[in-house]
Amino acid sequence: MKLHARFTDEGFAAAEWVVALGLIMLPMVMVVGSIAPWIARQTMAREIGQEAARLVVLADDLESGLASAERLAHAVVANYGLSGDDLEFVSIRTEPESAALTRGVDVVVEVRVRVPALTIPGIGSIAEVWWNTSHVEHVDDFRGFP
């Protein structure tokens, strides 16, 4: 008489269900938790680029415009609860590049912001990437300078 072991497909459905949900939900929670910081940092960089370009265009000269743009950037970064290391101006220039701040030139502001690549709720961000944006503002063709 030969004894055969019987294998069945029975399992612990409750335990398997919990493990399956955990393996499916955890990556989804991490991605959804990462979306808000991405959008917030990108919005901050766009806002700084637009407002800094506007301040330079309205300034009396390029140097005072650059100083105003720096102050604005520090204030916005502080309002978002970040440090100054999370943002940097790539360039603030006029186009054509050799032109001073005069009528009809364009002011180009390029900004880089550090964005967390993956955020785990309760733990923090794992990796970070830099995201670039730029904004062009035109100096009014009929503007008067002091």
Image: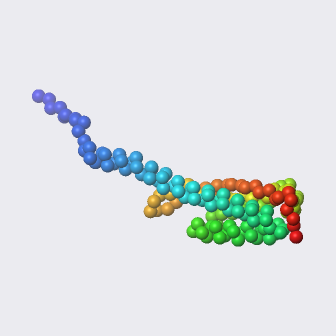
The answer to whether residue 72 is left or right of residue 108 is left
Pick the front one: 49 or 111: 49
Pick the front one: 80 or 84: 80
The quadrant the C terminus occupies is bottom right
Query: Residue 33, percent across and down?
Result: 48, 56
**Which of the 4 image quarters holds residue 77?**
bottom right
The residue furthest top is 1
Query: Residue 92, percent across and down?
Result: 77, 61
Query: Residue 3, percent across and down?
Result: 15, 32
The answer to whether residue 86 is left or right of residue 108 is left
The residue furthest front is 142
Pick the front one: 141 or 37: 141
Residue 79 visible? The answer is yes
Residue, x 82% and y 66% (percent of image)? Answer: 62
**Which of the 4 image quarters holds residue 51?**
bottom right
The quadrant the N terminus occupies is top left
The answer to whether residue 122 is left or right of residue 113 is left
Query: Residue 27, percent across and down?
Result: 45, 50
The answer to whether residue 96 is left or right of residue 22 is right
Residue 114 visible? The answer is no
Residue, x 17% and y 32% (percent of image)? Answer: 4
Residue, x 37% and y 50% (percent of image)? Answer: 22
**Which of the 4 image quarters holds residue 65?**
bottom right
Residue, x 83% and y 69% (percent of image)? Answer: 60
Pick the front one: 98 or 116: 98
